[in-house]
Image (tube, rainbow, N blue to C red):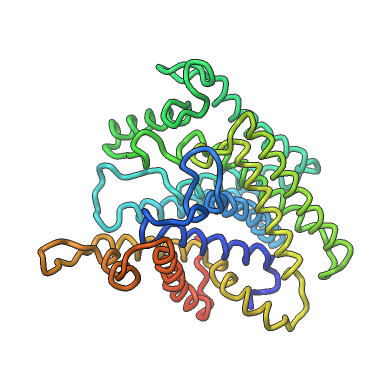
Amino acid sequence: MVAPQRVLSVDVLRGITIAFMILVNDPGDWDHLFTQLDHAPWNGWTLTDLVFPTFLFLVGASIVFSLESRAAKGDCWKTLTGHVIVRSFKILLLEFVLVFFPRMHWTGMRLYGVLTRIALCYLLAGLVMVAVMKMRQRVPLLIGIVVFLVVGYWVLLRWVPVPGAGMPGRGIPLLDPNQNLASWMDRGAMAWTQHWLHTGALYRKTRDPEGLLSTLPAVASTLLGSLAGMWMRRPRGVRGSADMQRMQLGLAAAGVLGVLAGELWSLWFPINKNLWTSSYVLLAAGWAGLALAMLSWLVDRRTQPWPRWLRWSTWPWLVYGSNAIAAFTVSVVIVKGMLYYKVVDSDGDLHSWWELAYERGFARHGSTEWTSLAFGLSFVVVCFLPVWWMWRKKWFWKM
């Protein structure tokens, strides 16, 4: 089992999240997907759209646990600040290594990405938490920062004219895929990197779901997780005590309010994962809070031994959650390697190892949503094996 000082519900939810992330990132056939295992085309949301903000929410909660633990050992604010900066740089460096592998081409690298966003959100949210952790009014201050970020982002996308296009909602549609302020800034940023660094590309050519401006509301998602982490640190009782029950009920109530507020705001500012809209921030944080409250009720501060059904149902997610970055890295390396190396068939056609594994192992009689899902689930198991090995060796990859 994980060391008792860890917040087990956070580890379990992180494990579920990273496993689901691998599943939806790596199906057998992108043309055959169940609706909930793919992102919404633009406005709206699916289960898949909740994965990344939930991970950032948990990053925010973990920041609280990490900083409090280090402060208790005597680390001063300068040491804590250095820790946040160094860890962010390590995650950013890992992203660039994974983007560079295996083609080793500099020109046209995508500088944005999942790990880039995690690094930036961890950096900004971590520095905020270091600054406020000793303040008496830190909760109202953090709420104020979150409100400033989500309302400010709404104002920018709704009321600031897009250069060369016009005013959103008047000259151009609100949240037009290409003619919005976030996409315009990303195109400008990549033009700058191409000119000065001779590299840089956008995921969707004209826009990027992990772009520059949309990092601001993503930081709000992370800080909401920090607020949840602070709330979870309050009770001192054991499982089932009044303190623990108040914490779990409060977390669940906040989750319900987040979901309702997000859905209500979406009437004026649509839920959109690609632009990480403010309504999306509230909705995703709400669902993450509800999931965390439920898991906290199941596993946090539960006396040993656990029921067998609970040990078996949570064990895989504890393994995945304790080494989430390692699991994500393993999945990326395997996928990129299998797509890079190719085999020539009897007709002289090239096929990647990834393509051959799917077509000959799962889709021999045709590709369907079920064969695509079966391949994705199998890949989640494959990625689990090295992470399980690390777990058994007690190797935990801390960036």
Point out residue 348 in the picture as x, y percentages from the top left corner: 10, 63
Q: Is residue 216 above or below residue 28?
A: above
Where does residue 86 sit, x and y in percent of width and height?
50, 52
Can you say whether 115 is above or below 187 in the image? Answer: below
Residue 185, position as x, y percentages in the image: 43, 28
User: Going by the image, does 35 lie left or right of 150?
Assistant: left
Q: Is residue 380 left or right of residue 194?
A: right
Nearer to us in this view, 351 or 248 = 351
Residue depicted at 46% across the width and 73% down the height: 381
Quarter occupied by residue 307: bottom right
Task: Determine the residue located farthest toward the right in the rendered image.
Answer: 242
Q: State whether residue 199 is above or below residue 231.
A: above
Seen from the viewer's position, the closer of residues 87 and 293 is 293
Which picture quadrant has residue 267?
top right
What residue appears at the point 77 percent right and 39 percent down from the top-left corner? 140
Name the residue rendered at 33%, 68% in the picture.
Answer: 363
Quarter in which the N terminus is drawn: bottom right
Along the horizontal axis of the image, is 269 left or right of 286?
left
- Along the horizontal axis of the image, is 232 left or right of 162? right
**Nearer the observer, 90 or 167:** 167
The image shows residue 119 at horizontal and vertical percentages of: 50, 49
Badge count: 0
| Residue appearing at x 25%, y 60% in the figure | 340
